[in-house]
Image (spheres, rainbow, N blue to C red):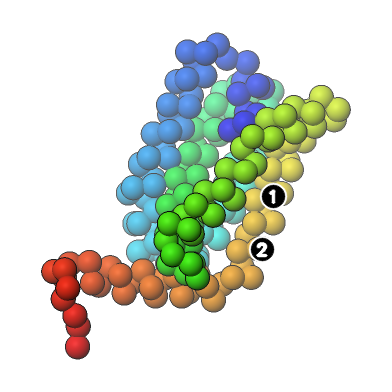
Amino acid sequence: MLGYAPFPMELDAIHLGLVFTGWGLMVAIFSVAGAPWLQRKLGLARTLYGNLALFALVVFVIAAFTGSRPVLITAVIVAGVFIGVNNTLTTQAVMMVAPVERPVASAAYGFVRFIGGGPAPFAAGKLAEHLNVHVPFVIGGCAVLLGIGILATGHRDLARAERNQAGADAHAGEPAGATTS
């Protein structure tokens, strides 16, 4: 979405910057405040499944309305909400269940997360050129839906991540070196 959505917007650099400032504010707010609140209210798994489903919906809205600049801009900014929640909760879950040390898990997660960022604009551009402008977003929305299915295969790991996080949160207020009996 981020790699290709600017092209159908056809905005100058300042206006495109304003759109992505709005997107970035949504990412920041929902990473810091929204994700923890949703996790407390719904649990980790339900929050991730619902969040990804809503994100897919927004990507499909972008696919359907690439010709409507107001809808496209609004959908991109709203997508920041779902990306913020996903970034926080997925990172947290990965760190809680990784079978390797946290720095290795973080590096591996970062690699997987950003590996598509480089070729995505090129691939999306080729898809739009050879098919139409809607196709890259339809494929993106389908990929997010596929991601929900893949995530569901690790549902036990999500439950373990939530338990591990609850244990870490319970010990967070204890002084260093304190043990529980």
Residue at the spot of label 2? 149
Badge 2 marks a residue whose secondary structure is helix
* On screen, residue 109 above or below 137: below
Q: Does residue 81 appear to the left or right of 155 in the view shown?
A: left
Residue 44 bears which disc, if any? none
Q: Residue at x 66, y 63 (%)?
A: 149
The residue type indicated by label 1 comes to Ala
Q: Residue at x 41, y 37 (%)?
A: 26
User: 123 or 141, which is in the foreground?
Assistant: 123
* On screen, residue 69 above or below 156: above
Q: Does residue 60 appear to the left or right of 2 in the view shown?
A: right
The residue type indicated by label 2 comes to Gly
Q: Residue at x 45, y 20 (%)?
A: 18
Q: Is residue 64 visible?
A: no
Question: Badges 2 and 1: C-beta atoms under 8 Å apart?
Answer: no
User: 78 or 98, which is in the foreground?
Assistant: 98
Q: Horizontal and vertical percent for residue 169?
A: 28, 68
Ranked by sequence position, the earlier of labels 2 and 1 is 1
Determine the residue located farthest toward the left in the rendered image: 175
* On screen, residue 139 above or below 146: above
Determine the residue located farthest toward the bottom in the rendered image: 181
Q: Residue at x 43, y 26 (%)?
A: 21
Badge 1 marks a residue whose secondary structure is helix
Q: Horizontal and vertical percent for residue 118?
A: 64, 34
Q: Horizontal and vertical percent for residue 125?
A: 74, 27
Q: Is residue 83 visible?
A: yes
Of the 4 image quadrants, the one containing the C terminus is bottom left
Residue at the spot of label 1? 143
